[in-house]
Amino acid sequence: MNASDLYALGERFNQNRTLLCFNGPISRSLIEEIGNALKNYLNAEHARPAEAMDVFSVYIEMIQNIRQYAALNGDVDASATVVIGRRDDSRYVVSAGNLVKDEDGQLLVARIRELAALDKPALKVEYKQQLHKPRTPGVASGAGLGLIDIARRAGAPLEASLTPAAGAGQAFFSLSVVI
């Protein structure tokens, strides 16, 4: 990337009110460092404590889901794209994405659309039902409590997309959460 491209990228980040952006393999230590940077940004922006906790919790849940999915599928890199920014109405937007098997992505997008159609009381009921479902140790529950918790913290319906990727049978899954 040359200097003028970097300037244009910085300008785009400013226009989109991007606070934090990361793209690449994500390790536990990097998750922690990004989390610390996020806390510092939220403190500098004087975010309300409850709002800051929601933004941080959603970031952690999303990135942990990406790492767990990668581990279950033998992907040691666990690459992700994470963007956290502000909207004009002073809400925060946490977005994250990663490569997934196309069929997994389709199921996930369908589940997110189901959750996006629920109001807060219905999400609470869904959460309690999921909480009481039996779990098999060592088997991923897929779009379970964590995703429902994200939907409960969101200030708007969740938005998900699936974009075909260069790999056979792969797609890039993206989730955006407004807080």
Image (cartoon, rainbow, N blue to C red):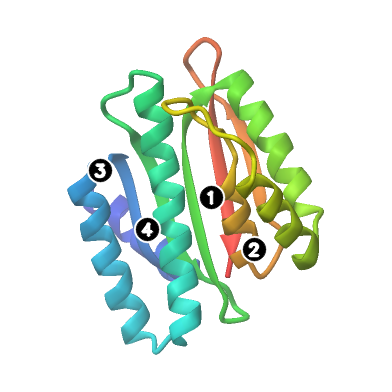
Choose the circle earlier in sequence order: 2 or 4: 4
Q: Say whether marks 2 and 1 touch (CB < 8 Å).
A: no
Mark pair 1, 4: CA separation: 36 Å
Task: Give the labeled residue for mark 4.
Answer: 8
Task: Give the labeled residue for mark 3.
Answer: 1
- The vertical placement of 7 against 175, above or below, is below
Q: Amino acid at mark 2?
A: Arg
Task: Give the labeled residue for mark 1.
Answer: 146
Mark pair 2, 4: CA separation: 36 Å
Q: Nearer the viewer, residue 160 or 66?
A: 66
* Location of residue 71 by image quarter: top left
Q: Residues within 10 Å of mark 2 (few under 14, many from 20)?
A: many
Q: Amino acid at mark 4?
A: Ala
- Front: mark 3 or 1: 1
Q: Residue at x 40, y 47 (%)?
A: 63
Q: Position of residue 12 (x, y in %)?
A: 44, 62
Q: Residue at x 57, y 73 (%)?
A: 87
Task: Give the labeled residue for mark 2.
Answer: 152
